[in-house]
Image (cartoon, grey):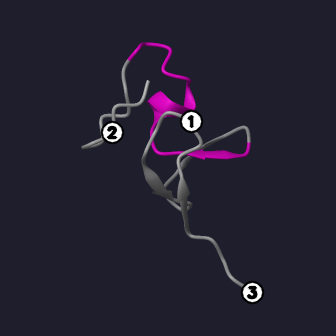
Amino acid sequence: MTTVTEMKCACESCLCVVSTNDAVQKDNKNYCSEACANGHTDGSGCGHTGCECS
């Protein structure tokens, strides 16, 4: 059996891969940041280098 330890952020426009241990979890989905988890309500991206999600 394989245990998944990293996965793509659940935000559709986000390019980040997040560790399942460090992820921000919301609605049983893993996000790389609070901004992604909250649906970018304040208009900011996740702030990670090379990613321009919104």
Which x, y percent locates residue 6? 53, 64
Q: CA distance from mark 1 to mark 2?
A: 12 Å
Q: Nearer the viewer, residue 23 or 39?
A: 39
Q: Secondary structure at mark 3?
A: loop
Among the two numbered marks 2 and 3 on one chain, the one whose residue lies closer to the N terminus: 3
- Residue 12 circle label: 1
The residue at which mark 2 appears reads as 51
Crowd rating for badge 2 (residues with CA inside 10 Å; few <14, some 14–19, many 20+): few
Q: Are marks 1 and 3 in contact (CB under 8 Å)?
A: no
Among the two numbered marks 1 and 3 on one chain, the one whose residue lies closer to the N terminus: 3
In the rendered structure, the answer to whether residue 16 lies left or right of residue 2 reads: left
Q: Nearer the viewer, mark 2 or mark 3?
A: 2
Q: CA distance from mark 1 to mark 3?
A: 28 Å
Q: Are marks 2 and 3 in contact (CB under 8 Å)?
A: no
Q: Secondary structure at mark 1?
A: loop
What's the residue type where badge 3 is placed?
Met
Among the two numbered marks 1 and 2 on one chain, the one whose residue lies closer to the N terminus: 1
Q: Can you say whether 43 is above or below 37 in the image?
A: above
Magenta range: 28-43
Q: Nearer the viewer, mark 1 or mark 3?
A: 1
Residue at figure coordinates x 73%, y 45% from the top left? 28
18 in the magenta segment:
no
